[in-house]
Image (cartoon, grey):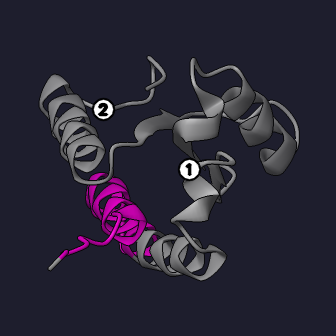
Amino acid sequence: MARGDGFSDDQRYEIDRAIRAAETVCRYEFSVYVGASDGEGGPFAQRLHASLIAPSRSILIMVDPAARLLEIVTGSVVRRELSDDSVRLAAVAMQSAFAQGDLLGGITRGVAQLADAARKPVTLHA
C-alpha cells in the first residue's frame, strides 16, 4: 500500500489483515494501492500490476480517491478462476462503499469478495 495514503496504522493493519485472509482463501497474491494515479487510471494500474513479483498470480486493486478511480487488474493465472463478472460485482460493491465515504470498508470487503470468487471449488472424489 502506498505511504501517504491517509490511513492510520490501525486502518493499514485492517487492510493487511484482509489481504492475508484473502491470500489464504484463494492462494493468489493481493496488492492494494491507494493514492494518486500517474496519468490515466487503467494504464497506471497495469504498470503497477506488471511490477509485482508474480503478476500472473496477482490481483491489484488501485484506488485514487481524489480522481474517483478504481481499477482491478488480474493476472493470467488468476483469470482462470476469477471471471470478469465477479470482478465487476466486487468493483460495484467497492464503489458503493466509497460513495458512502467508507474507503476502508470498501477495500476490505472488495478484497474478501474477490478472494471468495477466485477460490477454487473443492473437488470430492469417491
Q: Position of residue 106 (x, y in %)?
A: 35, 63
54 on left or right of 67: left
**Residue at x 57% of width, y 17% of height:** 53
What is the span of residues highlighted in magenta in the rendered image? 97-125
The residue that label 2 is drawn on is 7
Image quadrant for the N terminus? top left
Residue 51 belongs to the span the image colors magenta = no
Q: Position of residue 74 (x, y in %)?
A: 63, 51
Q: Secondary structure at mark 1?
A: loop
The residue that label 1 is drawn on is 65
**Residue at x 24% of width, y 30% of height:** 12
114 on left or right of 89: left
- Position of residue 2 relative to residue 117, above or below, is above
**Residue at x 51% of width, y 65% of height:** 81
Real-space CA distance between mark 1 and mark 2, rounded to the nearest whole angstrom: 12 Å
Q: Quadrant of residue 94?
A: bottom left
